[in-house]
Amino acid sequence: MSNEAKQFNAFTRLYRGLTTINFVGRKKTWFTVSTIIIVAGLLSLGVRGFNLGIDFKGGSSWEVLAPHSSIAKMTAAVEGAGLSQPTIEKLGAKTYEVTADLNNLSQSAQLTETNKVVTAMAKAADVNAIQVSTSSVGPTWGGSVTSRALEALIVFFLAVVLYISARFEPKMALAAFVAMVHDLLVTVGVYSLFGFQLTPDTVIAILTILGYSLYDTVVVFDRVRDNTGSVLKSGDMTYGDMVNLSMNQTLARSINTSLVAILPVLSILIVGAYILGATTLQNYGLALTVGLFSGAYSSIFIASPLLAVLKEREPRFKELKLRVEARGGRETLTPASAALLSGEGAQRAVKTGATASTDAVIQARARKQKRR
Amino acid sequence: MASHVGTKRSMTVSLILTLLIAFGSLGATLALGWGPKLGLDLDGGLSVVYKPAVKTSTANMQEVVSILTNRVNGLGVSGAQVNLQGKNVVVSAPGVKDARAVLDAVGQTAQLYFRPVLCEVTLNKGKLTNVNPTTLPTCPSKYLLNQANLGVTVNSQSVSGFTMNTVSPDPEFGNVATTLPVYDDPNSRVILPILGNPTQRYLLGPAQMTGQSIAKAVAQEDSAGAWVVNYSLTGTGSKLWDQVAQSNFHQLVAIELDGVIQSAPVIQPTQAAFSSFGGTGQISGSFTESSAKNLAIAMQFGALPVRLIPLTTQTISPTLGHSALVAGLGAGLVGLALVMLYAILYYRALGFVILLGLGATAALLWAIISALGHTAFAPSFNLAGVTGLIVSIGITVDSYIVYFERLKDETRAGRSVRTSVDRGFRSAWRTVLAADFVSLLAAVLLYIIAVGDVRGFAFFLGLSTLMDIFMTWYFTRPLVVLLGRRSGSSNSALSIAAGLNSGGSDNE
């Protein structure tokens, strides 16, 4: 089987279900890689903190579409209007964004200054004043958005742990939970490391990622649960081998799904944000891209190996492992051969002497489905 | 094993119905000219979030909402909404052409307090200290603006009809800063400046009445041509005002609006003894036409039960909104096209199932979003919502991928395509339900707990997840199963078997 597999390239092996990647066995590598990224992120967070947007620090920003202007022209205009230390950026091809902090002024003085800058920018862009967008944020706004998001996060974690415990089992809930915390830490760390600007949009995007990462994990765990009955009863495989098989079985799906999820998000980031210049899209796109990569990684390399580690500490799977090892080596199944095994259960099972159990399992599965 | 997930007839009906509903409703929506209710970041407009300056009851906040609604409606702005989100008030007016004009009217977050004036205090130049009003010292008696020190006497010889003593300001407070908005609590003492003269300041007692007691206020010229504000009080306000006026008789009462003393008139200085106001009164002083009118408007409409602090204010120009819409839709379409291309390259014939499915889902979603745009129920369609939809492309396509990968597994097991489509759907359906449930859970929790744009995002993510469950059962299942049952002998490159191209059959 493995010789046959080697004659194809990686894509064909994946496409035909001939992969035998040892995800569980190389868990130390995956866990180390993640730990390094997370520790680096947390160190950076401790030293440099976040690059906070005006939504968190408080401040004002103005935006205008000005195809025929320049940064120098805008700077001169807003400084002429009395802004001290403004930041002027060009977004996309023709949008200018000016940021400054007016929170030390009184409410009415802020309004007056905001209007002065609007007039100045409209003049510099050669448009009517109503074409200038403004945004002013008090110093506590971002904090209140974040605290609501944190509430949502905690409730979400609880609900997810309960759901997976009930529908699958508590150890799967724990593994999925760790994978989600992993994604959270990685994304937060990457934001600090690269100095990406943190806005409330980023916070929303991170919440979505967690949902998505979990969705990905659930699909793999669903397969693990299916296999727990059928594959393990043959006695040829340890729990870890079975998780590995499940992952190879869902690998094509995992890669395809991650690709179709990342394609539209990259399109948000590249087409929406950099070519057409919409800031909100940029905020979402960046966080989603970072998070989706982390989410795809964590459901394959963190959640499932961790599940195997947790389960193999249970006495019955410990015993199983000893039995399998005592027999001298395990059988490494490709998804394709595992499928053959279940499909032609009768013929194949005669060799392994497990006819009855294999058959019984197929019936058990069928019964379950009728109930649903 | 006779495992059917539906009869041929029922599946044909379900498939045709689904396609009819999807494209029919899209056609109907387009024919009616309906479109989604665009959020202000796509359509331009105004959005302000206010928080109460001090803790207050929900009833008070609901009154704030109704007063602000009146103000916005008074401007003739259509489609504007004022609502409570948690403890904050959110004012949004999407599609408004000149958002700043609306902001100027709504942003006047007037809160009126009637406070007794305790004493006048000086203001030093140089560094000032902020003091929590609960620890403010009291004025020594010689500086108090009480009846004894003021000594108001009726004097018909004087122009104003009375005379009173000058009481010098208390220098002890010179280094204390004017009370900050966060400490401007009706129950505390405060130091506030007088309108138009920021260096003249009074130490004021706790508020004895708020603007809620005022029924009506108008600016008028009196017989001598001076501007005055005539006001009338509500039933309960009338009694309260009499009490306040009696206890402060021949003393000053400050009318405070948003941390500034608008006026600090002496109570009935031209009368020797207190008499009831009988529900009406007049404030005179050195008013100009505009200052009198502003005071009258603030007294009548500005009477919020609690002071509001703007947390975030946004005005979006219609052109920028339009360019964001183009960017969002552009990104979505490019993303969709890439996904479809990938699906066809990878799954061939089955890729066209994904293509048709995504098309039907998109048609149905657009129709639903447009129809919801005509109700007050749905959040408006904003950039966050667009992102939610774009993200859901992944979730939608994943359901197909889960099913098709199961199909490959089944055919690898040596089963015919015919049996595989049934068996594969059963296990895929369970996975799709479990996974979509998680996505729905995230959407519902976000919608309930989060504020602002997040809700739009959660709503559209949740809607498209529900749509995915619907389409998987009523569209993907019948189409693939029907194709699978027909495809037994077909060997064309576009046949379902070509898309599966299983390793299993190669091994046979």
Image: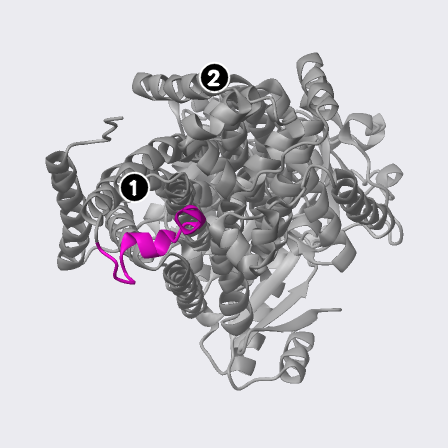
Task: Give the residue pinned by disc 1.
Answer: B416
Q: Amino acid at mark 1?
A: Ser
Disc 1 sits on a residue from what chain?
Answer: B
Disc 2 sits on a residue from what chain?
Answer: A
- Residue B421 placed where, x, y %? 29, 40
Task: Give the residue pinned by disc 2.
Answer: A357
Q: Secondary structure at mark 1?
A: loop
Counting other residues with Cα less than 10 Å from the Cα at mark 1, is it few (<14), some (14-19), or many (20 or more)? some
Residue at 23% across, 26% down: B2
Residue at 47% across, 72% down: A129
Q: Can the viewer see residue A136 in this picture?
A: no
- Residue A118 placed where, x, y %? 55, 70
Determine whether, in the image, residue B483 is placed left or right of residue B284. Answer: left
Q: Can the viewer see residue A319 in this picture?
A: yes
> Could you say which is closer to the camera, residue A81 or residue B427?
B427
Residue at 53% across, 51% down: A255
| Magenta residues, start to end | B490-508
Residue at 55% across, 74% down: A92
> Could you say which is closer to the camera, residue A118 or residue B400?
B400
Q: Amino acid at mark 2?
A: Ser
Counting other residues with Cα less than 10 Å from the Cα at mark 2, is it few (<14), some (14-19), or many (20 or more)? some
